[in-house]
């Protein structure tokens, strides 16, 4: 068996779990080894999955691609906004 988290070997039995012969079941009995996890990951995941999902990750949707961009050198505060407010003109 490969390396496993240290707490696996000292964990108490699973209260509701019994073998067909009524033997107590411990987490260490059912926890997969690192090799089993790695083998499953290799069988289930491939490069194409990531390429498909992330090929256009930074493209955004239509709202991201075409926002209204104000012109001018000073931000035009929206007086009706409850999200962001102007700090004012500063000390006078």
Image (tube, grey):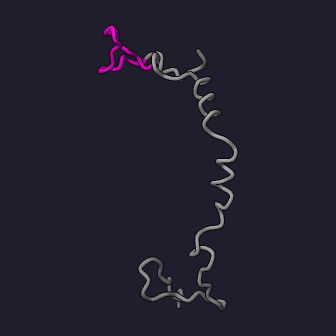
In magenta stretch: residue 63? no
- Magenta-drawn segment: 11-27
Q: Position of residue 36 (x, y in %)?
A: 58, 24
Q: Position of residue 8 (x, y in %)?
A: 47, 20
Quarter holding the N terminus is: top right
Q: Is residue 38 left or right of residue 92?
A: right
The structure residue drawn at horizontal position 41% and vertical position 80%, both measured from the top left corner, is: 82
Q: Is residue 83 left or right of residue 16?
A: right
Q: Position of residue 21 (x, y in %)?
A: 33, 8
Which residue is at the front of the view, 78 or 36? 36
Residue 54 versus residue 12 in the image, above or below: below
Q: Position of residue 23 (x, y in %)?
A: 34, 9
Q: Quadrant of residue 20?
A: top left
Q: Is residue 74 left or right of residue 20?
A: right
The structure residue drawn at horizontal position 58% and vertical position 74%, both measured from the top left corner, is: 62
The structure residue drawn at horizontal position 66% and vertical position 61%, both measured from the top left corner, is: 56
Residue 7 versus residue 67 in the image, above or below: above
In magenta stretch: residue 20? yes
């Amino acid at each position: 068996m490969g390396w496993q988290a240290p707490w696996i070997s000292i964990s108490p039995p699973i209260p509701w779990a019994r073998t067909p012969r009524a033997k107590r079941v411990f987490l260490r009995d059912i926890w997969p080894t690192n090799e089993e996890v790695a083998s499953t990951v290799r069988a289930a995941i491939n490069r194409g999955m990531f390429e498909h999902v992330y090929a256009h990750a930074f493209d955004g949707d239509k709202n991201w691609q075409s926002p209204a961009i104000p012109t001018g050198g000073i931000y035009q505060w929206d007086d009706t906004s409850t999200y962001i407010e102007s700090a004012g003109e500063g000390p006078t």
